[in-house]
Image (cartoon, rainbow, N blue to C red):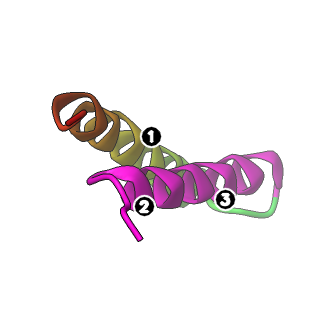
Amino acid sequence: MNVREGLIPTILGSAVTATGYALRQRHATNKTIANTVFGFGLAHIVLDAIDLVEHRR
């Protein structure tokens, strides 16, 4: 099985971003924690997308 470098962390970042977004929608959740989780997920998506583009071959 050939998995491109950066693909799994990008998918994981998408899941973390979705979790952070869901936490932001709940009013009972601490906004700082929700924004931190959301930003952490976005950072994974961006950085690992760069890996996907750099290692196309």
Residue at 52% across, 54% down: 11
Using the numbered discs, state the Cα–Cα distance from disc 1 to disc 3 in whole angstroms. 11 Å
SS type, badge 3: helix
SS type, badge 1: helix
What segment is highlighted magenta in the picture? Answer: 1-27
* Rendering coords of residue 42 (x, y %): 44, 40
Which of label 2 and label 3 is nearer to you?
2
Which of label 1 and label 2 is nearer to you?
2
Residue at 69% across, 46% down: 21
* Rendering coords of residue 48 (x, y %): 30, 44
Residue at the spot of label 1: 42
Could you tell which of marks 1 and 2 lies nearer the N-terminus? 2
In the foreground, 9 or 38 = 9
Residue at 33% across, 52% down: 4
Query: Within 10 angstroms of label 1, few (less than 14), some, or many (20 or more) residues?
Result: many
Using the numbered discs, state the Cα–Cα distance from disc 2 to disc 3 in whole angstroms. 17 Å
Q: Majority secondary structure of the magenta segment?
A: helix
What's under tag 1, amino acid-wise? Leu
Furthest-bottom residue in this view: 1
* Rendering coords of residue 16 (x, y %): 55, 59
Q: Is residue 17 magenta?
A: yes
Residue at 25% across, 33% down: 56
Please state, as top left, top right, bottom left or bottom right, where the C terminus lies in the image: top left
What's under tag 2, amino acid-wise? Ile
Could you tell which of marks 1 and 3 lies nearer the N-terminus? 3
In the foreground, 30 or 57 = 57
In the foreground, 19 or 45 = 45
Residue at the spot of label 2: 8
Residue at the spot of label 3: 19
